[in-house]
Image (spheres, grey):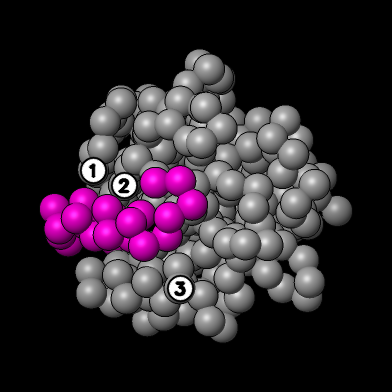
Amino acid sequence: MQDLKITLIQAEQIWENKQRNLENYEQLLKNVQNTDLILFPEMFHTGFTMNSEEFAEEMHSSLGIKWLKNIAQIKNTACYTSLIIKENNCFYNRGVFVDETGTITTYDKRKLFGLAGENNYFTAGHSESIVEYKGWKINLQICYDLRFPENCRNFEINNQAQYDLLFYVANWPEKRIGHWKTLLPARAIENQCYVAAVNRIGSDDNGHNYTGDSVIHNMNGEVISNHSTNQSIIEASLSVDDLVASRKSLPFLKDYTDNKG
C-alpha cells in the first residue's frame, strides 16, 4: 500500500454531446501529470439524461469505455466515472473503473433518482462494488447513493476494514448543494475513510444549475482539497500513515455490524 494521488476533473458537461464532452476532457487533462486515479462526473460524456435508449452503449463496443481505456493507458493511471450501458435489454447508470492495463470493474447505481424519473428509464443495481488498486480498497458509488449510508457501511472483518476510500461521481444540482456539503464529510467520518467526490458545473437542458464543489475529505471529514464553481483540476495525496493512525487511535469500525446479508 502506498500514498495515492487523486485527481478530480470538475467540468462543464455539454448536453447529450459525447464528442464535445470528450474533447473538453482532453483539454483539461493536458494539465494532469503523475496521478494514480482520475475521476470524471456522472454520465460523463452525455450529462444526466433520461434518453437512455438513444445514448446507451454496450460494454464490448462502448465509445466511452474505449476513451477511458486510452486515457488510462496514456496517463498510466486508473479512471472512474459512469455512463449509460445497455445489457440484456436493460439500461444501467453504470460506474466503470478502468486501470492502466485496461482491466474494468463495474458498479451499477443502486439508488435511482426518482425526482428525475431515473427509475423509469434505468434498472437499479443490487450490490456494492469494491475494487482493489495499488493496495487500496475503493468503494464505488454514484451521486444519489450518497443519501443512503447503508449503501456504504464500512466495518471490519479479521481486523481489516472493508474499504479505505469512497468515490462519488455526480450531477448534483446547486439547489441541494448544501446537502452534498453535509453528507460527504459524514460519510468520511462514519466510515473512517477518505472520500473523493466530483461534481459537474454549468447548466443542463432541464434548467438545473450545478456549482461543482468537488472535494476530497480525510477520515475526520476535513477538507484536504476542493474547488467551487468553475472548470478545474482538484488534486490531493492520500496518506497511508494518516489512515492507519486514525483507525488505530479511534478503532470504532470493529464495533459496526455487517447487516448486508
Q: Position of residue 143 (x, y in %)?
A: 57, 40
Q: How many marks?
A: 3
Q: How far apart are the two marked residues, 1 and 3, measured between alpha carbons?
A: 24 Å
Amino acid type, label 1? Ile
Mark 3 = which residue?
A: 63
Query: Looking at the picture, how far across and down is residue 228, in whole percent?
Result: 30, 25
Q: From the viewer's perspective, tell me whether residue 243 is left or right of residue 110.
A: left
> Nearer the observer, disc 1 or disc 3?
3
Which range is magenta?
A: 14-36
Residues at badges 1 and 3 in contact (C-beta under 8 Å)?
A: no
**Alpha-carbon span between mark 2 and mark 3:** 19 Å
Q: Position of residue 74 (x, y in %)?
A: 23, 74
Query: Looking at the image, is 3 positioned above or below residue 250?
Result: below
| 179 w.r.t. 81: above or below | above
Identity, as a three-letter code, of the amino acid under mark 3? Leu
Residue 122 in the image: state x and y as whole percent. Answer: 74, 54
Q: Is residue 153 left or right of residue 205?
A: right
Q: Pointer 2: what residue? A: 9
Give whichever of 84, 243 is nearer the camera.
Answer: 84
- Report if the CB atoms under discs 2 and 3 are less than 8 Å apart: no
The residue located at (47%, 21%) in the rendering is 174
Q: Amino acid at mark 2?
A: Ile
Q: Earlier in the sequence, mark 2 or mark 3?
A: 2
Quickly name the residue at label 1.
Answer: 233
Asked if the residue under mark 1 is in contact with the one under mark 2, i.e. CB atoms within 8 Å, the reply is: yes
Q: What kind of element bears circle 1?
A: strand
Question: Residue at the spot x=55%, y=19% of the render?
Answer: 176
